[in-house]
Image (spheres, rainbow, N blue to C red):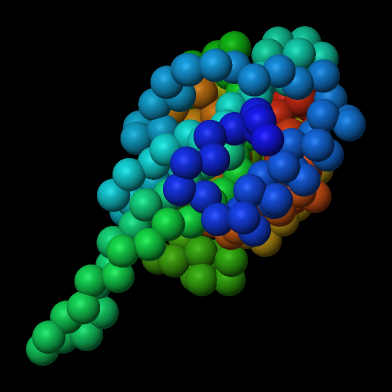
């Protein structure tokens, strides 16, 4: 059977999950496989601890104002366990991420739901970017940037409204200049992937 993603190295359960996810996306959006595109996943801090990141399937969503993408990603990790005689654990994870291109250069930015620990650290070491005219957003999300001017310009009210609609305790948003990715480090699931796709469509349509 031909699948619209790379099945090399995948178990039957993972193939079924990929297939169910693809079918759900296709039932909601006009999507097309992208072919071989380098999305430069290695540029993102979200994958800094990975030995390798391999895109097993990538799809462009064509009914957004500008194209946005959903990616099926294979994460290769190696971890050590133990102290005296450490063991190496070599394993793979399969995740879904969505990607959109922003009109404005945001520099580098990292956005996730804010925790109590974040709030306490902020009292001692104020490093977070807060939007004083948008307390609801600043109370909900933890934002780290390397260029405050670029970030404040790119993360306008329209941008923040779209992000506010995406409330998920494990979601991570990372931006490198004009490229935004959103996802989390949990196994790929159809409904969760659909929410990521809906987010980048709203972002592409409003920002």
Q: Quadrant of the C terminus?
A: top right
Does the image show residue 201? yes
Tell me residue 75's x, y (percent). 43, 49
**The one of 92 and 71 positioned closer to us in this rendering:** 92
Q: Residue at x 54, y 16 (%)?
A: 35
Quarter that holds the N terminus: top right
Expressed as whole percent of the image width and height from the top left, the position of residue 46 reads: 43, 46
Residue at x-position 39% and y-position 41%: 53
Q: Where residue 30 appears, x then y in whole percent?
A: 82, 19
Residue 118: % across, % down: 51, 64
Against 85, residue 148 (above or below) is above
Q: Is 36 located above or below residue 88 in the figure?
A: above
Of 33 and 200, nearer the camera is 33
Q: Residue at x 47, y 17 (%)?
A: 37
112 lies above or below 175: below
Q: Is residue 166 visible?
A: no
The furthest residue to the front:
1
Of all residues shown, which one is farthest toward the right? 27
The number of callouts visible is: 0
């Amino acid at each position: 059977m031909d699948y619209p993603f790379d099945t090399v190295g995948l178990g039957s359960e993972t193939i079924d999950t990929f297939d169910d996810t693809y079918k759900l996306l296709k039932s909601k959006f006009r999507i097309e496989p992208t072919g071989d595109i380098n999305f430069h996943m290695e540029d993102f801090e979200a994958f800094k601890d990975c030995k390798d990141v391999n895109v097993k399937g990538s799809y462009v969503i064509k009914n957004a104002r500008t194209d946005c993408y959903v990616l099926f990603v294979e994460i290769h990790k190696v971890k050590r366990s133990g102290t005296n005689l450490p063991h190496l654990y070599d394993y793979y994870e399969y995740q879904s991420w969505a990607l959109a291109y922003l009109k404005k250069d945001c520099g580098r930015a990292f956005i996730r739901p804010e925790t109590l620990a974040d709030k306490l650290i902020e009292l001692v070491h104020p490093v977070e970017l807060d939007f004083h005219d948008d307390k609801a957003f600043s109370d909900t999300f933890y934002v780290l940037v390397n260029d405050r001017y670029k970030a404040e310009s790119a993360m306008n009210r329209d941008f923040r409204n779209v992000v506010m609609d995406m409330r998920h305790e494990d979601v991570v948003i990372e931006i490198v200049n004009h490229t935004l990715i959103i996802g989390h480090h949990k196994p790929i699931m159809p409904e969760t992937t659909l929410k990521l796709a809906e987010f980048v469509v709203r972002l592409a349509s409003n920002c």
